[in-house]
Amino acid sequence: MKVMHFIKRGLSGLITTASGARISAEGTDGEAPDFPSQAIYFANHSSHLDFVTLWAIMPAELQPKVRPIAAADYWGSGIKQSVATGIFNAHLVHRYKDRPHTTIDARPTRQTDSGSSPKTSQLTGMTDILDAGDSLIIFPEGTRGPGDQVATFQAGLYRLAKHSPDVPVVPVTLKNLGRILPKGEAIPVPRLSQVIVHKPLFVGDDESQEDFLARARRVLADELATETEGETA
């Protein structure tokens, strides 16, 4: 067990070094953020490095209880599945019909039959994880985007927040990871990236799905609208 612990810590260091990740809390200049013992972490999605990097920056004692949500169509077979589930403890879900990435000022979407929101079977697995006391890493856009925009959020984030209203919902802005490993590419390009951990959110008792998703999405969109750092190394 100790051997696996050291392997994972070494891998975490390798990942953060390779991605050039600078980790900070909201409103600070490089100060390390606080991570709750249990949380629903959500972030913008532009690269396959996203959940890997977010997992890697977690404190060692929290990593075994952090479950990234990953697409089974990409991570669900061969060595990728062994890596995703064996090392990162990912929970694999089957994606439905992809939605085109929308502009930064698009409104949050409601559930539809087209697959733009997680199905009940997907959420059941995620709520089981929360009920067991573990954390989630999710990407509410449901598909990768260009990196400087945030697509409409699927309904799943709201449902998870309502299921566990006492669990903090922590926004995380990922900057430049899409440039390090662009969509369709297999070899990373060295650049600097930023991982900004924002203050936790909690869903209001009477807060509607639309209002909560708009509020959560705005945190990431506003941060991405600021200057993004990242020069080729």
Image (spheres, grey):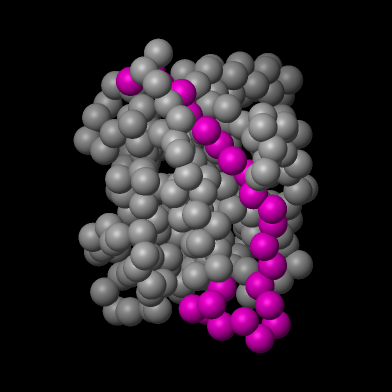
Q: Quadrant of the N terminus?
A: top right
Q: Residue at x 62, y 82 (%)?
A: 207
> Magenta residues: mostly which secondary structure?
loop
Is 210 drawn above or below residue 146 in the view shown?
below
In this view of the protein, can residue 40 be seen by the observer?
A: yes
Q: Residue at x 30, y 45 (%)?
A: 146
Looking at the image, which residue sits at the far front?
Answer: 227
Q: Where residue 15 sits: x, y (%)? A: 51, 23
Is 42 drawn above or below residue 118 in the view shown?
above
Q: Residue at x 54, y 53 (%)?
A: 42
Q: Where residue 81 sits: x, y (%)? A: 40, 37
Numbered-mark total: 0
In this view of the protein, can residue 69 be seen by the observer?
A: no
Give 13 or 219, whichever is nearer the viewer: 219
Instruction: Report which quarter residue 211 is drawn in.
Output: bottom right
Q: Quadrant of the C terminus?
A: top left
Q: Where residue 24 sits: x, y (%)? A: 65, 35
Q: Is residue 208 inside the magenta stretch?
A: yes
Q: Is residue 1 left or right of residue 97?
A: right
Q: Where residue 169 sits: x, y (%)? A: 65, 59
Give 164 or 54, whichever is nearer the viewer: 54
Instruction: Report which quarter residue 23 is drawn in.
Output: top right
Q: Residue at x 31, y 70 (%)?
A: 115
Looking at the image, which residue sits at the far top?
Answer: 233
Is 1 drawn above or below residue 202 in the view shown?
above
Instruction: Report which quarter residue 127 is drawn in.
Output: bottom right
Q: Which residues are magenta?
A: 189-212
Q: Is residue 156 inside the magenta stretch?
A: no
Q: Is residue 174 left or right of residue 203?
A: left
Give 67 or 1, whichever is nearer the viewer: 67
Q: Is residue 129 left or right of residue 35?
A: left
